[in-house]
Amino acid sequence: MTWTIKTALQWATHYLQEQGIESARLDSELLLAYTLGTDRVHLYLHPDRPLSPTEQEVFTTFLHRRAHHEPLAYITGRREFWSLEFLVTPAVLIPRPETELLVEQAVLLLQKMQGQGEPLWVLDIGTGSGNIAVSVATAVPTCRVVALDRSWAALGVARHNAVRHGVDSRVHLVQGDLLAPFQTETSPFALILSNPPYVPAADWEHLPPTIKQYEPRLALDGGKEGIDYAERIIREARFYLRPDGYLLLEMGEGQAASLLALCQDNGYCCPALIKDYAGIDRVLIAQGKQKGAAMRDRNGKNAY
Protein backbone atom coordinates (compact mmCIF):
# COMPACT_ATOMS: atom_id res chain seq x y z
CA MET A 1 0.00 0.00 0.00
CA THR A 2 1.32 3.43 -1.00
CA TRP A 3 0.88 6.12 1.62
CA THR A 4 0.06 9.73 0.98
CA ILE A 5 1.12 12.40 3.45
CA LYS A 6 -2.39 12.35 4.92
CA THR A 7 -2.65 8.59 5.37
CA ALA A 8 0.94 8.34 6.63
CA LEU A 9 0.21 10.87 9.36
CA GLN A 10 -3.01 9.15 10.33
CA TRP A 11 -1.31 5.75 10.67
CA ALA A 12 1.74 7.18 12.43
CA THR A 13 -0.30 9.13 14.97
CA HIS A 14 -2.38 6.08 15.86
CA TYR A 15 0.73 3.89 16.12
CA LEU A 16 2.60 6.26 18.44
CA GLN A 17 -0.49 6.77 20.59
CA GLU A 18 -0.71 3.01 21.06
CA GLN A 19 2.93 3.03 22.21
CA GLY A 20 2.19 5.64 24.87
CA ILE A 21 3.78 8.63 23.13
CA GLU A 22 1.88 11.69 24.39
CA SER A 23 2.90 14.02 21.56
CA ALA A 24 2.03 11.46 18.88
CA ARG A 25 0.60 13.81 16.27
CA LEU A 26 3.31 16.45 16.60
CA ASP A 27 6.09 13.87 16.56
CA SER A 28 4.57 12.21 13.48
CA GLU A 29 4.50 15.53 11.65
CA LEU A 30 8.06 16.42 12.61
CA LEU A 31 9.41 13.01 11.62
CA LEU A 32 7.59 13.00 8.30
CA ALA A 33 8.73 16.52 7.50
CA TYR A 34 12.30 15.48 8.35
CA THR A 35 11.97 12.38 6.15
CA LEU A 36 10.77 14.46 3.20
CA GLY A 37 13.25 17.29 3.77
CA THR A 38 10.50 19.86 4.20
CA ASP A 39 8.51 21.59 6.94
CA ARG A 40 5.18 20.93 8.64
CA VAL A 41 3.38 23.57 6.56
CA HIS A 42 4.20 21.61 3.41
CA LEU A 43 2.48 18.55 4.88
CA TYR A 44 -0.82 20.42 5.17
CA LEU A 45 -0.50 22.07 1.77
CA HIS A 46 0.11 18.76 -0.01
CA PRO A 47 -1.85 16.06 1.88
CA ASP A 48 -2.31 13.87 -1.24
CA ARG A 49 1.37 13.80 -2.18
CA PRO A 50 2.41 10.09 -2.30
CA LEU A 51 5.45 8.75 -0.44
CA SER A 52 8.00 6.78 -2.40
CA PRO A 53 8.86 3.27 -1.12
CA THR A 54 12.17 4.61 0.22
CA GLU A 55 10.49 7.52 2.01
CA GLN A 56 7.94 5.17 3.51
CA GLU A 57 10.65 2.80 4.75
CA VAL A 58 12.71 5.61 6.27
CA PHE A 59 9.65 7.16 7.94
CA THR A 60 8.63 3.81 9.40
CA THR A 61 12.13 3.29 10.80
CA PHE A 62 11.98 6.68 12.51
CA LEU A 63 8.56 5.86 13.96
CA HIS A 64 9.79 2.60 15.44
CA ARG A 65 12.67 4.43 17.10
CA ARG A 66 10.29 7.02 18.54
CA ALA A 67 7.93 4.27 19.71
CA HIS A 68 10.81 2.97 21.85
CA HIS A 69 10.94 6.45 23.45
CA GLU A 70 14.11 7.58 21.70
CA PRO A 71 14.12 11.39 21.86
CA LEU A 72 13.10 13.15 18.68
CA ALA A 73 16.29 15.24 18.78
CA TYR A 74 18.47 12.12 18.61
CA ILE A 75 16.47 10.72 15.70
CA THR A 76 16.71 13.90 13.64
CA GLY A 77 20.12 14.91 15.02
CA ARG A 78 19.04 18.47 15.61
CA ARG A 79 17.48 20.75 18.21
CA GLU A 80 16.58 24.43 18.11
CA PHE A 81 17.92 26.60 20.92
CA TRP A 82 18.13 30.39 21.16
CA SER A 83 16.67 30.51 17.60
CA LEU A 84 19.68 28.53 16.35
CA GLU A 85 19.73 24.93 15.13
CA PHE A 86 22.22 22.64 16.87
CA LEU A 87 23.59 19.25 16.01
CA VAL A 88 22.63 16.82 18.79
CA THR A 89 23.90 13.27 19.31
CA PRO A 90 23.53 10.75 22.17
CA ALA A 91 26.93 11.99 23.41
CA VAL A 92 25.33 15.23 24.65
CA LEU A 93 22.39 16.38 26.70
CA ILE A 94 19.50 17.65 24.59
CA PRO A 95 19.24 21.46 25.07
CA ARG A 96 16.19 22.50 27.10
CA PRO A 97 14.14 25.69 26.69
CA GLU A 98 14.71 26.69 30.32
CA THR A 99 18.46 26.95 29.67
CA GLU A 100 17.74 29.89 27.38
CA LEU A 101 17.10 31.84 30.59
CA LEU A 102 20.73 31.27 31.57
CA VAL A 103 21.89 32.54 28.17
CA GLU A 104 19.57 35.54 28.38
CA GLN A 105 20.96 36.61 31.74
CA ALA A 106 24.53 36.08 30.55
CA VAL A 107 23.96 38.24 27.48
CA LEU A 108 22.43 41.04 29.55
CA LEU A 109 25.42 41.07 31.91
CA LEU A 110 27.95 41.01 29.07
CA GLN A 111 26.22 43.89 27.32
CA LYS A 112 26.52 45.95 30.51
CA MET A 113 30.19 45.04 30.87
CA GLN A 114 31.16 45.95 27.29
CA GLY A 115 33.22 49.04 26.63
CA GLN A 116 35.46 48.71 29.68
CA GLY A 117 38.56 48.33 27.50
CA GLU A 118 39.20 44.66 28.31
CA PRO A 119 38.19 41.60 26.30
CA LEU A 120 35.27 39.75 27.84
CA TRP A 121 36.16 36.13 28.48
CA VAL A 122 33.41 33.66 29.36
CA LEU A 123 33.77 30.10 30.65
CA ASP A 124 31.06 27.54 29.93
CA ILE A 125 31.53 24.51 32.21
CA GLY A 126 30.08 21.26 30.84
CA THR A 127 29.42 22.66 27.39
CA GLY A 128 27.90 19.50 25.89
CA SER A 129 26.57 20.42 22.45
CA GLY A 130 27.97 23.94 22.91
CA ASN A 131 24.49 25.43 22.90
CA ILE A 132 25.28 27.89 25.71
CA ALA A 133 28.75 28.83 24.45
CA VAL A 134 27.70 29.26 20.82
CA SER A 135 24.53 31.17 21.71
CA VAL A 136 26.44 33.63 23.91
CA ALA A 137 29.15 34.05 21.27
CA THR A 138 26.60 34.81 18.53
CA ALA A 139 24.71 37.27 20.74
CA VAL A 140 27.79 39.15 21.98
CA PRO A 141 30.36 39.42 19.16
CA THR A 142 32.95 41.09 21.42
CA CYS A 143 33.24 38.17 23.81
CA ARG A 144 35.35 35.02 23.69
CA VAL A 145 34.10 31.79 25.20
CA VAL A 146 36.03 28.86 26.62
CA ALA A 147 33.83 25.77 26.30
CA LEU A 148 34.87 23.03 28.72
CA ASP A 149 33.75 19.41 28.89
CA ARG A 150 35.07 16.10 30.21
CA SER A 151 33.84 14.26 27.12
CA TRP A 152 35.86 14.34 23.90
CA ALA A 153 32.76 13.17 22.02
CA ALA A 154 30.77 16.13 23.38
CA LEU A 155 33.54 18.53 22.39
CA GLY A 156 33.36 17.16 18.84
CA VAL A 157 29.67 18.05 18.72
CA ALA A 158 30.37 21.49 20.19
CA ARG A 159 33.07 22.10 17.58
CA HIS A 160 30.64 21.26 14.78
CA ASN A 161 28.08 23.71 16.17
CA ALA A 162 30.63 26.49 16.63
CA VAL A 163 31.75 26.11 13.01
CA ARG A 164 28.18 25.88 11.80
CA HIS A 165 27.29 29.21 13.36
CA GLY A 166 30.52 30.98 12.42
CA VAL A 167 31.91 31.50 15.93
CA ASP A 168 34.64 28.85 15.97
CA SER A 169 37.33 31.55 16.08
CA ARG A 170 35.85 32.85 19.37
CA VAL A 171 34.76 29.57 21.01
CA HIS A 172 37.78 27.74 22.40
CA LEU A 173 37.26 24.09 23.30
CA VAL A 174 39.02 22.58 26.33
CA GLN A 175 38.83 19.03 27.70
CA GLY A 176 38.90 18.67 31.47
CA ASP A 177 37.03 18.35 34.76
CA LEU A 178 35.38 21.54 35.95
CA LEU A 179 38.04 24.19 36.61
CA ALA A 180 41.05 21.86 36.82
CA PRO A 181 42.59 22.93 33.45
CA PHE A 182 42.94 26.57 34.50
CA GLN A 183 45.24 28.62 36.72
CA THR A 184 43.82 31.45 38.76
CA GLU A 185 46.58 33.82 37.69
CA THR A 186 45.71 33.49 33.99
CA SER A 187 41.94 33.01 34.07
CA PRO A 188 40.19 36.35 34.64
CA PHE A 189 36.74 35.40 33.37
CA ALA A 190 34.01 38.02 33.21
CA LEU A 191 31.40 35.28 33.47
CA ILE A 192 31.45 31.62 34.45
CA LEU A 193 28.36 29.78 33.27
CA SER A 194 27.17 26.25 33.82
CA ASN A 195 24.16 24.03 33.44
CA PRO A 196 25.62 21.31 35.67
CA PRO A 197 24.07 17.90 36.35
CA TYR A 198 21.37 18.56 38.95
CA VAL A 199 19.06 15.53 39.06
CA PRO A 200 19.19 13.95 42.55
CA ALA A 201 20.47 10.37 42.33
CA ALA A 202 17.32 8.99 43.95
CA ASP A 203 15.17 10.55 41.20
CA TRP A 204 17.01 8.82 38.36
CA GLU A 205 14.83 5.71 38.24
CA HIS A 206 11.70 7.85 38.17
CA LEU A 207 12.69 9.83 35.08
CA PRO A 208 10.78 9.24 31.82
CA PRO A 209 12.30 6.53 29.61
CA THR A 210 13.02 9.12 26.91
CA ILE A 211 15.55 10.62 29.34
CA LYS A 212 16.67 7.69 31.47
CA GLN A 213 17.28 5.27 28.62
CA TYR A 214 18.91 7.64 26.13
CA GLU A 215 20.47 10.81 27.52
CA PRO A 216 23.95 10.64 29.11
CA ARG A 217 23.65 10.10 32.84
CA LEU A 218 26.96 11.94 33.29
CA ALA A 219 25.21 15.13 32.16
CA LEU A 220 22.21 14.70 34.47
CA ASP A 221 23.08 12.93 37.74
CA GLY A 222 23.99 15.55 40.33
CA GLY A 223 24.66 13.18 43.22
CA LYS A 224 22.66 12.56 46.37
CA GLU A 225 21.02 15.98 46.63
CA GLY A 226 21.56 16.97 43.02
CA ILE A 227 24.03 19.73 43.86
CA ASP A 228 27.41 17.94 43.93
CA TYR A 229 28.70 19.68 40.80
CA ALA A 230 27.10 23.03 41.59
CA GLU A 231 28.73 22.97 45.03
CA ARG A 232 32.18 22.31 43.54
CA ILE A 233 31.72 25.09 41.01
CA ILE A 234 30.60 27.59 43.64
CA ARG A 235 33.57 26.76 45.88
CA GLU A 236 36.13 27.10 43.06
CA ALA A 237 34.74 29.61 40.54
CA ARG A 238 35.47 32.73 42.59
CA PHE A 239 39.20 32.14 42.12
CA TYR A 240 38.80 32.38 38.34
CA LEU A 241 36.55 35.45 38.08
CA ARG A 242 37.52 39.05 37.52
CA PRO A 243 36.77 41.25 40.55
CA ASP A 244 33.58 42.37 38.80
CA GLY A 245 32.83 38.94 37.33
CA TYR A 246 29.73 36.82 37.80
CA LEU A 247 28.87 33.17 38.29
CA LEU A 248 25.64 31.94 36.68
CA LEU A 249 24.28 28.46 37.39
CA GLU A 250 21.17 26.64 36.27
CA MET A 251 19.56 24.63 39.07
CA GLY A 252 16.78 22.17 39.77
CA GLU A 253 13.58 22.74 41.68
CA GLY A 254 14.09 23.01 45.44
CA GLN A 255 17.86 23.61 45.27
CA ALA A 256 17.89 27.40 45.59
CA ALA A 257 18.24 27.64 49.38
CA SER A 258 21.25 25.32 49.49
CA LEU A 259 23.02 27.11 46.66
CA LEU A 260 22.35 30.56 48.09
CA ALA A 261 23.85 29.44 51.40
CA LEU A 262 26.92 28.10 49.59
CA CYS A 263 27.37 31.43 47.83
CA GLN A 264 27.17 33.33 51.07
CA ASP A 265 29.58 30.94 52.80
CA ASN A 266 32.09 31.34 49.97
CA GLY A 267 32.18 35.12 49.84
CA TYR A 268 30.04 35.91 46.80
CA CYS A 269 28.29 39.23 46.57
CA CYS A 270 24.53 39.66 46.33
CA PRO A 271 23.45 36.23 45.06
CA ALA A 272 20.12 36.44 43.25
CA LEU A 273 17.62 34.00 41.76
CA ILE A 274 15.84 34.15 38.41
CA LYS A 275 12.59 32.22 38.01
CA ASP A 276 11.62 30.39 34.84
CA TYR A 277 8.22 30.68 33.17
CA ALA A 278 6.82 28.02 35.50
CA GLY A 279 7.74 30.15 38.52
CA ILE A 280 10.60 27.82 39.55
CA ASP A 281 13.92 29.26 40.74
CA ARG A 282 16.07 28.29 37.76
CA VAL A 283 19.17 30.50 37.52
CA LEU A 284 21.51 31.63 40.27
CA ILE A 285 23.57 34.79 39.70
CA ALA A 286 26.32 35.83 42.09
CA GLN A 287 29.19 38.30 41.84
CA GLY A 288 32.56 36.83 42.60
CA LYS A 289 33.74 38.90 45.51
CA GLN A 290 31.96 40.71 48.31
CA LYS A 291 33.02 44.30 48.72
CA GLY A 292 35.35 44.61 51.66
CA ALA A 293 35.70 40.85 52.08
CA ALA A 294 39.06 39.13 51.83
CA MET A 295 39.26 36.43 49.16
CA ARG A 296 40.48 33.15 50.60
CA ASP A 297 42.53 30.60 48.74
CA ARG A 298 41.94 26.83 48.96
CA ASN A 299 44.05 26.64 52.11
CA GLY A 300 41.95 29.24 53.87
CA LYS A 301 44.58 31.99 53.60
CA ASN A 302 43.95 35.46 52.24
CA ALA A 303 44.57 35.40 48.49
CA TYR A 304 45.16 39.18 48.50
Image: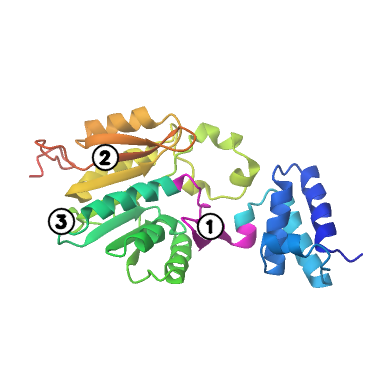
Seen at 45% across and 56% down, the residue is 128
Q: Amino acid at mark 3?
A: Glu
Secondary element at image label 1: strand
Q: Position of residue 30 (x, y in %)?
A: 68, 57
Whether residue 49 appears in magenta in the rendering, the answer is no
- From the top left corner, tell me how far across and down residue 280 is, in percent: 45, 33
Residue that carries the numbered disc 3 in the rendered image:
185
Image mark for residue 80? 1
The type of colouring in the image is: rainbow
Q: How far apart are the alpha carbons under marks 1 and 3?
A: 37 Å
Task: Give coordinates of residue 27: x percent, y percent.
Answer: 69, 52
Q: Quadrant of residue 17?
A: top right
Question: Please, what is the three-letter code of the amino acid marked with disc 2?
Answer: Ala
- Quarter holding the N terminus is bottom right
Residue 126 tag number? none
In this picture, residue 267 sits left or right of residue 65: left
In the image, the segment drawn in magenta is: 74-99
The C terminus lies in quadrant:
top left
- Kindly check if marks 2 and 1 are in contact, taking CB atoms under 8 A apart as contact: no
Q: Which amino acid type is marked by label 1?
A: Glu
Position in image of residue 268 (x %, y %)? 21, 37
Badge 3 density bin: few <14, some 14–19, many ≥20, Cα 10 Å: few
Q: Residues within 10 Å of mark 2 (few under 14, many from 20)?
A: many
Instruction: Say if the magenta span includes residue 96.
Output: yes
SS at mark 3? helix
For residue 286, the mark is 2
